[in-house]
Amino acid sequence: MTTASVRSEKRHFLTTASQTPRTAGARWVVGRFAELSMRSKRWASLVIVLVAAAVYLNSLGNYFLVDDFWHLNEAARTPWAALFQPWQYSGEDFKAYWFNEQRLHGVRGEGFFRPMVTLLYKLAGAAFGLDAWGYHLVNVALHALASLAVFAVARLMFSHRWVAVAVALMFAAHPSHAETVQWVAANADAAMGCFFLASFAAFGWWLRQRRPWQYGGAVVAFVAALCSKESAIVLPAVLLAYEFYRAHIANKEWPRFGELAARHAVFWTMAAAYLLMHIKSFAGISAMNEGGQYMHSPFSATFVPFVLFNLSYELLHLAVPFPLFPIDPGELIQRAGVLPVTLVCAAVLAALWFGTSWLMRGLRGWSFFPLFTVLTLAPTFPILVAQRFLYVPSLGFCLLLGALLQRADDTGWLAQRWSRLNLSRRGLVMASVGVVVAGYAMMTMFLNLMWGLPSNLVRRQITAIRQELPSLPRGSSLYLLNLWPPAFGMEFMLPLLYQDPTLDVQVLTIRPKMLPIDSVQPPGAMVKFFSKCLPDHIGATRIESRWNGLETLRVSIEGGRFMRSLTEEVYPAAAEAQRQGARVDTPGFTAEVVRADAGGVQTLAFRFRSTDPPPMVLDMQNGRAERVR
């Protein structure tokens, strides 16, 4: 674009009417942004990267959490030469939890194949060691690259560059990405999203420009996406749907089967080969999660309402980005019934469809955008709802917003209602984009702070452990009592910190309540808020532990039940370990259930075997780490 045309476009954005100082400042910002975004792709890309990074700056101080520890340990154990071997994710990973169903039943899995994730952990480990900020920085970089890929995709959909910039900025700041970007273990979703969107963009531009490197780039990016996470397997279906969208927009006949086969055969062949190669992995992961909340069997009678609930919940979250909690539809279905839940969710989805149809009326091809969201969500349908699953699907929602922005610009809808601001028609649209992006950014940064609360408490607990036990003899046994649920997986981190792979860390009990952390303090506003969302896991509880002799530790709980934490609902404790009188033998101790009822376990007795060095028990209750003497 020439300098003269840029100036002309800028004059189009700004009116020549008299200006107050306030409107003049606002118009200068809008005009400057529009000028920069139209002048070159470089300026647009720079703005997108800066916004994507700035929104997550306050996540860099967060620590590791839950699955992070397992990944760190697995990456440390994996040599560089074995990067392209599947990780074994099986019942052996729960050996520190004596009450876990997978360990008691000996369930094993084939593992999963995510070499890009392994590579990211290995590179981050080589560069940053065990400093969490470096791993968070990797996720932020992936998000910035994914936002640039969104810009490239949006340029395929919209003729105006500023609309594509707006779509990319909304994607960069959207609160539905908070879990994906700031949670280190979600780097699989961030990496898959980056490569998935890059492949989609490269294929779309190849259809337009027919440059061989673009098609090759699409294939290579698809391979990288498959090596990041299994849900990338839906990309061929997305590319096929895009072909029909493109024909519809151009008012052309549907592409012929032969042409489609020639263009898409590589992608479908790769997807089929990937599925055949990893069918055992999928079956193994399904077997390991059987009986828990994490996965729902497609052959269950409640599968349809489960899927409809998850889909409704996730789509509503994209439109109104409230905090997304892992609500188990199974409990809701059990209480309300299959038919009522199915009908209510179907009604919600129908209302969303008709509302979107009304907003998008008259725009050709808009149905591809929600179809993109549903297609990319499909692999997660059997899985408990999670915010990270929305990372790629959110593009469909952002493209819908982009289409509405273009319509508002073309029709002058905003200008008719806000003409007193002395902004041009497009200037008002751009100002609206700024308001939306700023609102999204504020919500995202708030969610980063929310994630920082549990992760930094885990950091303080690990620091307290190191202070209580500055050093340990090699081969020591360390027992954790009342582990806080978000610290699940800490047992993998401690051998790394002590640089002793022979350190045996065992979890005796998990505290069933997540909040409040300190049972002495009265519940605050946040605790009361979360108690409405997760009533079974929020509230006061008191746990007492005392030694009976030198080798027997007796633990009792009031105001809750052991083996009923949120973690143990996802990875359930064995049913046979929850009955009164049950005994479980482990190499280091024997656990006996002294008192239990239908609600769970109330009293446990642990009889430790004499070892050298002697076992050490740490009480993790209320965010501390104190030795039980």
Image: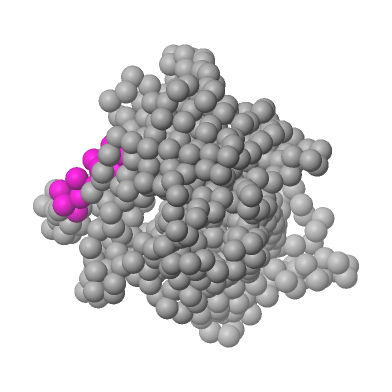
Q: Which color scheme does this rendered protein use? A: one colour
Could you tell me if residue 358 is visible in this image? no
Tell me if residue 275 is in the magenta stretch.
yes
Q: How many marks?
A: 0
Q: Is residue 543 left or right of residue 257?
A: right
| Residue that extends furthest to the bottom in the rendered view of this protein | 3
Tell me if residue 399 is in the magenta stretch.
no
Could you tell me if residue 610 is visible in this image? yes
Q: Nearer the viewer, residue 402 or 305?
A: 305
Predominant secondary structure in magenta?
A: helix
| Residue that extends furthest to the right in the rendered view of this protein | 20
| Residue that extends furthest to the left in the rendered view of this protein | 258
Q: Is residue 405 above or below residue 220?
A: above
Query: Residue visible at 34% across and 70% down?
Result: 119
Q: Nearer the viewer, residue 397 or 585?
A: 585
Q: Position of residue 281 (x, y in %)?
A: 23, 47
Q: Position of residue 289 (x, y in %)?
A: 35, 37
Q: Is residue 236 left or right of residue 159?
A: left
Q: Position of residue 579 (x, y in %)?
A: 45, 22
Query: Residue visible at 24% across and 69% down?
Result: 82
Query: Residue visible at 33% across and 33% down?
Result: 290
Q: Identify the image quadrant of residue 531.
A: top right
Query: Residue visible at 59% across and 43% down?
Result: 482
Q: Position of residue 449 (x, y in %)?
A: 67, 56
Span highlighted in magenta in the image: 274-289
Q: Is residue 569 left or right of residue 283?
A: right
Q: Nearer the viewer, residue 300 or 253?
A: 300
